[in-house]
């Protein structure tokens, strides 16, 4: 589902300012994740655990946005897929670099706020989509670049994401993953190698965000 022009604007509850490669990005959101979590009821905590992770700006996405802007020439005019777009930081960064971006999230408020934030920051709107990565509605081999910030935080996501990568990545394409040194993510790199991919850690950087410093890995994955 695409966020259409007729959608009403979301009601921002708070604004986050994120500095990336010399530019300050403004990110409106409904509230912080803890406030949204407290407001949840039992219906939200079923099998899918629809937790409001989208309402936070994650250090992995900040490093990923840095990498996107550092590689603007590489991305210009290329088709790109933003996996788990959240508040829209990486999709906006790529759009500002001239990439042709489709960006999706599982939660409708994330899609609405991402679209709002792109307008707030004056960048060309990516194609914002509501989609489940377990059932992607994407053309095979459609994307030159695929990326995601902190998407490997549960082992149950490994297989669906690997299938998505195999389906959607164009021949010769690249996948970028921002990963905040999570123990749970360690097995996925060997699993990717077994599935015919070649993951390489490009950099490890500190990300200062909301008064804290996080260590984040940036991986590039290609098909062998």
Image (spheres, helix red, strand yellow):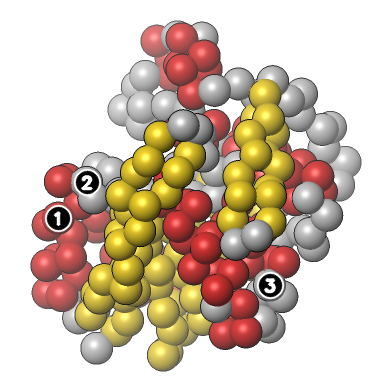
Give the CA distance from mark 2 to mark 3: 29 Å
The residue singled out by tag 2 in the image is 182
Q: Is residue 158 above or below residue 162?
A: above
Residue 181 x %, y %: 23, 50
Label 2 neighbour load within 10 Å: few <14, some 14-19, many 20+: few
Kind of element beneath mark 1: helix
Q: What element carries label 3?
A: loop
Q: Nearer the viewer, mark 1 or mark 3?
A: 3
Does residue 43 appear in the picture of this structure?
Answer: yes
- Residue 134 appears in the rendering: no
SS category of the residue bearing label 2: loop
Q: Quadrant of residue 220?
A: bottom left
Q: Is 48 left or right of 17, judged from the image as shown? A: left
Spatial distance from mark 1 to mark 3, Cα to Cα?
31 Å
Which residue is label 3 attached to? 97
The part of the image, by quadrant, that contains residue 103 is: bottom right
Alpha carbons under labels 2 and 1: distance apart? 7 Å
Q: Position of residue 122 (x, y in %)?
A: 83, 54
Taking depth in this image into account, of 20 and 79 the one nearest to the observer is 20
Residue topped by disc 1: 186
Q: In which quarter of the image is residue 95?
A: bottom right
Residue for point 55% across, 50% down: 85
Neighbourhood count class around disc 3 (C-alpha, 10 Å): few under 14, some 14–19, many 20 upward: many
Look at the image and tell me in which quarter the C terminus lies. bottom left
How far across and down, in percent of the image, does residue 87 sit?
A: 60, 42
Q: Earlier in the sequence, mark 1 or mark 3?
A: 3
* Residue visible at 32% across and 68% down in the picture: 203
Viewer-proximal residue among 76 and 22: 22
The x and y percentages for residue 156 are: 23, 45
Whether residues under marks 2 and 1 lie with C-beta atoms below 8 angstroms apart, the answer is yes
């Amino acid at each position: 589902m695409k966020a259409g022009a007729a959608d009403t604007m979301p009601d921002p509850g708070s604004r986050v300012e994120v500095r990336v490669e010399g530019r300050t990005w403004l990110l409106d959101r409904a509230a912080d994740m803890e406030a949204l979590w407290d407001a949840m009821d039992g219906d939200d905590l079923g099998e899918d655990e629809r937790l409001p992770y989208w309402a936070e700006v994650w250090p992995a996405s900040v490093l990923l946005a840095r990498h996107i802007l550092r590689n603007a020439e590489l991305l210009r005019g290329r088709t790109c897929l933003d996996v788990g777009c959240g508040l829209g930081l990486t999709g906006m960064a790529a759009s500002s670099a001239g990439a042709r971006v489709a960006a999706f999230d599982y939660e409708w408020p994330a899609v609405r706020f991402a679209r709002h934030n792109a307008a707030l920051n004056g960048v060309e709107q990516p194609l914002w989509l509501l989609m489940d990565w377990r059932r992607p509605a994407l053309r095979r081999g459609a994307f030159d670049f695929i990326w995601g910030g902190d998407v490997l935080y549960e082992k149950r996501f490994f297989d669906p994401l690997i299938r998505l990568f195999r389906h959607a990545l164009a021949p010769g394409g690249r996948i970028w993953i921002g990963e905040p040194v999570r123990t749970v993510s360690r097995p996925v790199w060997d699993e990717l190698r077994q599935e015919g991919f070649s993951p390489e850690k490009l950099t490890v950087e500190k990300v200062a965000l909301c008064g804290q410093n996080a260590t984040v890995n940036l991986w590039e994955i290609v098909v062998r």
